[in-house]
Amino acid sequence: MTGRLVIANRGEIARRVLRAGRERGLAVAVISTPEDADACIRKEADAVLEVSSFLAGAEIVAAATAWGATLLHPGYGFLSENAEFAEAVEAAGIAFLGPRPETMRALGAKEAAKRLAQQCGVPTLPALLSHELAAVPPASWGTELEARGLKAPFLVKASGGGGGRGMRVVPDLAALPEAIKQASSEALAGFGDGTVFVERYLAAPRHIEVQVFGDGEGGGVFLGERECSLQRRHQKVIEEAPSAMVDLALREALGRAAMALVRETRYRGAGTVEFLVDTEGQFHFLEVNTRLQVEHPVTEAVYGVDLVQAQLDLAEGRWPKALGDPGTFRVPEPQGVSLEARILAEDPRHGFLPTPGSLSRYREPAGQGVRVDSGVIEGGRVNDRFDSMIAKLIVWGPDRREAVDRLAQALSEFVILGCVTNLPFLLALSRHPDFLHGRVSTDWIAANLPALNAPLLPESLARLVEGEAFRSQLSETLQGLGAPISPVAARFAAQAHPELKVGSRDEKPFLRIEHAGSPARFTLRWDGPEVTFHALRRGHHLDLRIQGESLLLEDPLSLPAVKKGASSSGVLCAPMAGKILECRVAVGDVVGEGQVLFILESMKMQMEVCTSAAGRVAALFATAGQVMEGPDPLAEVVAVTA
């Protein structure tokens, strides 16, 4: 069948769907915006349908209709779980690759899904829902929470959307009003729905999700579970199929619970039912993602299915035969183990701050059992107007140990220069013995941050590359000036005999940096094992990717970097590029230590900018609505004299 497919999304999922459409001979158009004008997919699709925003549903439907679309894939995020959008798409005569609008209304909002799960006999966590929050004054929230058996800490959650946005762990009742306000604001900005509720917080559960695929008539198939417990800020970092902690009995119980919701709602297409498993092994319904999930490739790898092709089959009126009989429940047997790591433009060593920027050097790993889904190419950039996803690294192995080994190897071979990424953090995680043995939970990353952010290089090599001799020689080599004149030890090295030692113990170790096949790839020869690495000059710094570590070192041959906004008088700077949502002070205000002065938004995340010490606001350099390009000055706070 010939058709015309529109992808109403961006980044790696848009390219993933584009690839699937091309495989079946469809013409493919991509929705895009002026802010995303340099996205590589705009050059790869058959047509670009430009709209003002990825949330502009009416514009998207009008553009798709004018182009003659027969199919529309929403990807994930943006409008993928918006029932009104799905309704408008289908009203225009375009097949929507997702569940029916009425199903999205029943399951897409977390609160509605919780009520439906209770009706189906699926265990749920106690909660104070949004209409209950609105019905009583904040002073009475404590009584209402206690009546439901909810004790601090609490979890504030957005009813719509996902990805950890609009979610806050609240330590006590006093902090609840501000947390609700911020979560609601973040949810509204992220996916157009500011509704939030309060739920029981489980401190160290396992996050297990179930992949389902419904035929729209009450039938469907259960495609196993994925482990998503490794999270930071409630956002998944590494996902796995199958889970190392799920046995056959628990897998069947999870599958039957998920399929009860599929039957009740006559679910159509791909969906994910998420659960939390507590320390006693009891599972609790969390939510339903009424769309394709970010981590769907690990399910594809262990069950031999293509979920995007299955979506296209169903949208074209055919049940995908590869998925099996939708009228019979069965527990699938996984073949091997698959892991997915999210490669993000963020800095784990500085609080996971977003780090949008250029991709001056971009090299993906390859090999047996390795797959990369990316939304970028070398020379592109990570856009600060969108999320921080660069790529997804997916590996498969016949058993868990081999899959973990392949993940670690692939992470060490992934090269990104130009912006800070989480690659060293992911590599450290993949090498940790707890991860190797599956001893993880949703709070494991937070509890192990010091170890995961520790330097990766051996101490002797770290000293060498941080030293001026190495940095000077690398800088000159990168500038095409050749290597500096070799020291005495280097000149004698060519004449060295295994039994003859020359030079002095005080002599600096011999080192030489040579090109290794490309302008940014080098070989380091020194008195240790030979090392191959990648490097570029970035401003006043040298950007290195070496033995899995990423380093940004001062270039000794460049002028000293001017630290914008730095001041001994107490200038407060933006921690990242982004937009000022709120300015909570005025010149002359006296502020306390840790007081919130600004709310900054970048890559769909909100951050509080607080004072480090008490004082008086002497000057303001930014206002609400202003866009910061980087660590720009926001305010000057001076000490208050007695």
Image (cartoon, helix red, strand yellow):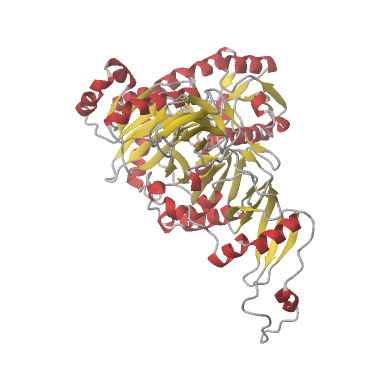
Q: Can you tell which quarter of the image residue 249 is in? A: top left
Using the rendered image of the protein, determine whether residue 270 is visible from the camera's viewpoint. no
- Farthest residue toward the front? 642
Q: Is residue 580 left or right of residue 482?
A: left
- Residue drawn at x 68%, y 41% is 377
Measured as percent of width and height from the top left, residue 39 is found at 67, 32
- Farthest residue toward the bottom? 499
Q: How many marks?
A: 0
Measured as percent of width and height from the top left, residue 240 is found at 46, 46
Measured as percent of width and height from the top left, residue 329 is found at 39, 36
Using the rendered image of the protein, determine whether residue 152 is visible from the camera's viewpoint. yes
- The N terminus - image quarter: top right
- Residue drawn at x 55%, y 22% is 625
**As displayed, is residue 167 above or below residue 466?**
above
- The C terminus - image quarter: top left
> Which residue occupies the foreground of this view, 212 or 583?
583
- Farthest residue toward the right? 481
Measured as percent of width and height from the top left, residue 103 is found at 43, 21
**As displayed, is residue 365 above or below residue 31?**
below
> Which residue occupies the foreground of this view, 258 or 395?
395
- Residue drawn at x 43%, y 43% is 231
Q: Is residue 554 left or right of residue 261?
A: right
> Which residue occupies the foreground of this view, 22 or 488?
488
Q: Can you tell which quarter of the image residue 312 is in? A: top right
